[in-house]
């Protein structure tokens, strides 16, 4: 079992070498992590088909890519034909019609927030081997940029499409995945639900949000502590 510690997220594909001539890595889904931000590299794990990212918390979007090997190997070739992933090349777009203007998108592009590489490493065994690899699909810098620009528009939200290719190395060359496209709604109040001032009454029930990041993919009950949001909300222990 793998574990990611929930934290505030900061933030050229090579030639293919699968036996069939197709991509050697196949991206299956975005894994929905269990309690404690755990995942187990099993095809039976649930997936998230459409992401959400809240501007209130300024985090990036964590994507847990479940990947499968399309490389074949004989028993004495397993080590040589194990792929070690090296990262993902990400292209973030905002399909028309979009709430972002052409100028807004150009500004994000100029800051390097729409095309970038995210590094990670995970071994992927041949003959249908499966691995889960987490990486920041949308950088926190983009979230903070949008939050600052649209601070005066509480209804703001935008649909983003993140298309990425996972890359890796095998003993005899580079390996890549098929392009995988994943939609994410970014805006105010996508996950954050402010329920009052901190701390909440002792008997209050608080929704904790997504196990890996309260800023994405689930409702988290928060409380207001002066100018700061506490997510999940703190509860009075007196």
Image (spheres, rainbow, N blue to C red):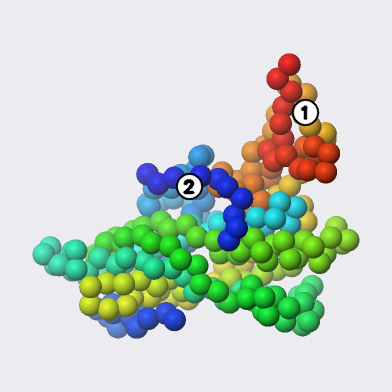
The structure residue drawn at horizontal position 64% and vertical position 46%, both measured from the top left corner, is: 214
Which of 147/162 is in front?
Answer: 147
Q: Is residue 2 left or right of residue 136?
A: left
Q: Which residue is mark 1?
A: 200
Which of 73/223 is in front?
Answer: 223
Mark 1 crowdedness (10 Å alpha carbons): few <14, some 14-19, many ≥20 = some
Q: Is residue 202 left or right of residue 90?
A: right
The structure residue drawn at horizontal position 43% and vertical position 62%, both measured from the top left corner, is: 120
Q: Earlier in the sequence, mark 1 or mark 2?
A: 2
Image vertical order of residue 60 relative to residue 72, above or below: above
Residue placed furthest toward the left: 76
Q: Which residue is mark 2?
A: 4
Residue 71 in the image: state x and y as whole percent.
26, 71
Mark 2 crowdedness (10 Å alpha carbons): few <14, some 14-19, many ≥20 = few
Q: Secondary structure at mark 1?
A: loop
Location of residue 199 (image quadrant)? top right
Residue 90 in the image: state x and y as whole percent.
53, 73
The number of discs equals 2
Residue 218's tag is none
The structure residue drawn at horizontal position 41% and vertical position 56%, both measured from the top left corner, is: 132
Residue 200 in the image: state x and y as whole percent.
77, 28
Q: Is residue 215 left or right of residue 152?
A: left
Q: Are marks 1 and 2 in contact (CB under 8 Å)?
A: no
Alpha carbon separation for disc pair 1 and 2: 28 Å
Q: Is residue 159 left or right of residue 197?
A: left
Q: Secondary structure at mark 2?
A: loop
Answer yes or no: is residue 96 visible: no
Quadrant occupied by the N terminus: top left
Answer yes or no: is residue 193 visible: yes
Location of residue 83 (image quadrant)? bottom left
The structure residue drawn at horizontal position 27% and vertical position 78%, both measured from the top left corner, is: 173
């Amino acid at each position: 079992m793998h574990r990611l510690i929930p934290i505030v997220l900061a933030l050229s594909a090579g030639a293919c070498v699968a036996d069939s001539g197709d991509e050697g890595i196949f991206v299956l889904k975005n894994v929905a992590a269990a309690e404690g931000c755990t995942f187990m590299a099993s095809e039976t794990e649930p997936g998230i088909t459409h992401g959400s990212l809240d501007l209130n918390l300024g985090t990036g979007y964590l994507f847990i890519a479940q990947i499968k090997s399309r490389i074949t190997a004989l028993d004495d070739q397993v080590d040589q034909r194990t792929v070690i992933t090296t990262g993902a090349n990400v292209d973030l777009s905002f399909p028309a019609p979009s709430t972002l203007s052409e100028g807004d998108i150009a500004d994000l592009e100029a800051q390097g927030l729409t095309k970038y590489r995210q590094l990670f490493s995970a071994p992927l065994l041949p003959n249908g081997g499966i691995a889960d690899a987490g990486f920041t699909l949308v950088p926190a810098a983009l979230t903070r940029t949008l939050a600052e620009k649209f601070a005066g528009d509480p209804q703001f939200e935008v649909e983003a499409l993140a298309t990425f290719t996972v890359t890796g190395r095998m003993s005899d060359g580079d390996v890549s995945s098929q392009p995988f496209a994943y939609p994410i709604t970014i805006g105010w109040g996508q996950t954050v639900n402010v329920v009052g001032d901190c701390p909440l009454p002792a008997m209050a029930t608080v929704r904790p949000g997504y196990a890996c990041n309260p800023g994405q993919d689930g409702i988290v009950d928060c409380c207001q502590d002066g100018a700061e949001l506490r997510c999940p909300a703190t509860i009075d222990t007196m």
